[in-house]
Image: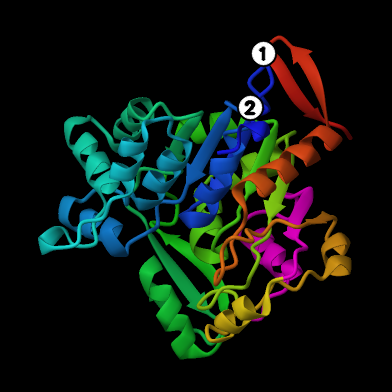
Amino acid sequence: MNTEHWRISSDGGPHIVAIGGGTGLSTMLRGLKYYSRNITAVVTMADDGGGSGMLRHDLGMPPPGDLRNCLQALANVEPVMEDLLAYRFHDGSLAGQSFGNLLLAALDGISDSFEEAVERMNQLLAVTGQVLPVTSENVNLVAEMENGTSVRGESKIFSFKRSQHCRIRRVRMEPEAPPVLPKVIDALREADVIVLGPGSLYTSIIPNLLVPGVADAVAESQALRIYVANIMTQEGETEGYTLSEHLQALFDHGRPDMVDLCLANSAVIPEEVRQRYRTENAQPMLVDGDAVRAMGVELICEPLSDETKRYKARHDSMKLARAILDVVEDRCVRTWTDQGVRYVRER
C-alpha cells in the first residue's frame, strides 16, 4: 500500500461505523483503516450460501463469511497470515471452504458465545477498530416479490427473482425481531460518521436495518450519515433501479431520515466492462440527482471506480476512503469533548 495515503491524525481519526456485508463493505474498510483507528464494521448475518452456509448447516453457528472478509480487511497481520485467511481448499469435503471461516468456527467452538468468538478473532488479528455481527441469532432472509410470491434464504433470492421477472417488494427476517448486539447500538450512538454500503441492497445492507434498534439508532444519530451508492445495478436484486430507487428501498425498510448525503461514482465505465455486465442485465448506476435531492439527500459524485479491474466495476478502496474523509473534513468540525476528540457535524 502506498504510504503517502497514510493519514491517521493523532486522535485516531473520526469514529466511523460502516454497515453492510459482502465484498463491498470489506473493500471500503481496506481504505478506511488508513484514515482512522476508530472503525466499527457492522455485518449482516443472513448469509446461507457457499462455505458459510455449509458451516451454518453443519455446526449450527451463524454464517462467518462476511465477518471473515471484514476481519481480514481490517487485520494487521503478516502477509502469510492474510494469505491463510483467504485460502480456500480445493479438494475433499472441505472444497470451497476458506481457512478464515474454519478459524472462526474453531473459535466459536472454544468460546461461550459467537459474540465472544468474534471478539477473540478481532484480538487475534490485531484488527483496526472492531468487527461486529449485527445479531448472533440464527436468522433467515425472506424476499417478497411484487407478484405476491416469496422465497426464503438469502442464497436463493437471486435465481428466484430472475424466474419471477418482477422486482422485490420487500425483504424481512425470520424470526422477525432478532436481538441486536448491544455493542452495535453503543457504536452507533458514539459514531461521528455512519456509512451505509456499498454492497448488495437487499442482501447486504437492508438486512442490518431489519434488526430492531438499528434503523432507529441510525436515524436518531447526530453523526454524519452517508450512503455509498453501488457503481452498477445488480442482477437478481436491482436491475433497472436508479439511485433514488435504491435510497427509497433503504428508507422503506428503515426510516426516511437515515441519510444526509449520498456518495456516487462519476467515473466513466469502460465499454468492455459495460458489455460484460449487459450479459447480467446490469448497467452503470443511473444517478438521478434531482430525485435524490428531492428526498432531502445531498449528492456528491466523485470518480471512485478501480481502473485496474479490467472486466469488473469495483470501488477503489483508497479513492472511496479519501472521498469519505473529504466529506467529513468539509462537513464536520474537530471538537474536544469530555470523551476526547470528536468530529461534530455542522448543522
Q: How is the image coloured?
A: rainbow
Residue in view at x 79 percent, y 41 percent: 327
- Residue 159 lies left or right of residue 168; in this view the side is left
Within 10 angstroms of label 2, few (less than 14), some, or many (20 or more) residues?
Answer: some
Please say if 232 is above or below 83.
Answer: below
CA distance for labels 1 and 2: 10 Å
Q: Which mark is residue 191?
A: none
Q: Is residue 255 magenta?
A: yes
Q: Which residue is mark 1?
A: 339
Left or right: 221 in relation to 118? right
Q: Is residue 94 above or below residue 193?
A: below
Give amino acid for label 2. Glu
Residue pictured at 59% horizontal, 61% vertical? 314
Is any part of residue 309 visible from this angle?
Answer: yes
26 with respect to 267 (left or right): left
Is 305 placed above or below 225 here? below
Q: Position of residue 159 (x, y in %)?
A: 41, 81
- The quadrant the N terminus occupies is top right
| Magenta residues, start to end | 239-268
Magenta-colored stretch includes residue 92: no
Examine the image and state in which quarter residue 231 appears: bottom right
In front of the other: 175 or 214: 214
Image vertical order of residue 249 relative to residue 23, above or below: below
- Where residue 289 sits in the image (x, y, percent)? 85, 66
Regarding residue 153, the answer to whether it shows in the image is no
Q: Amino acid at mark 1?
A: Gln
Which residue matches tag 2? Answer: 190
